Image (spheres, grey):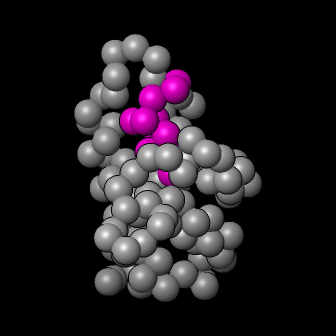
Amino acid sequence: MTDEDREAAGKEFSRVVNMSPAELEKWLGTEDSKAVGWTHEGEGEAVGHQSGRRIVEIKRKKKTELTDDDYAHMRKVVGYVHRHMAQGGPAEDKAHSKWRYSLMNWGHDPLK
């Protein structure tokens, strides 16, 4: 990954992840957060929930501490958020939808 790739990934990650580490940590502790998402066979935690914990770690690092794996995860988060935002969510009660809850596990609150 080039420095240019890292810079682009970091900028877009910062743009789409609109929850602070504290907000995301608080959200990840809720039952609504734990009730959504896809789980790998044999695991107890959904992929999005795992991603949320990783996002908190990444956001708390200094730029000089970020690894290529961190940047790869940032790109994964950006892709997820873009795909799910394109779906548009439910017509009614977006605030209490699995669509919103799933996005929030990935650090993006679509109602912000």
Q: Is residue 56 left or right of residue 39?
A: right
Q: Position of residue 66 (x, y in %)?
A: 54, 81
Q: Is residue 64 magenta?
A: no
Looking at this rendering, what residue extends furthest in the top direction? 92
> Which residue is nearer to you in this view: 2 or 59?
59
Quadrant of the rendered structure where residue 90 is?
A: top left
In the rendered view, tell whether residue 82 sits above or below residue 92.
below
> Which residue is nearer to you in this view: 36 or 72?
36
What residue is rendered at 43% in x and 60% in y?
46
In the rendered view, tell whether residue 112 sits above or below residue 58.
above
Q: Position of residue 24 (x, y in %)?
A: 64, 52
Q: Is residue 101 magenta?
A: yes
Q: Position of residue 93 (x, y in %)?
A: 46, 17
Residue extent of the magenta highlight: 95-105
What residue is rendered at 57% in x and 41% in y?
32
Q: Looking at the image, can residue 90 be seen?
A: yes
Quadrant of the rendered structure where residue 83 is?
A: top left
In the rendered view, tell whether residue 83 sits above or below residue 93.
below
In the rendered view, tell whether residue 20 sits above or below residue 5.
above
Q: Position of residue 34 (x, y in %)?
A: 54, 51
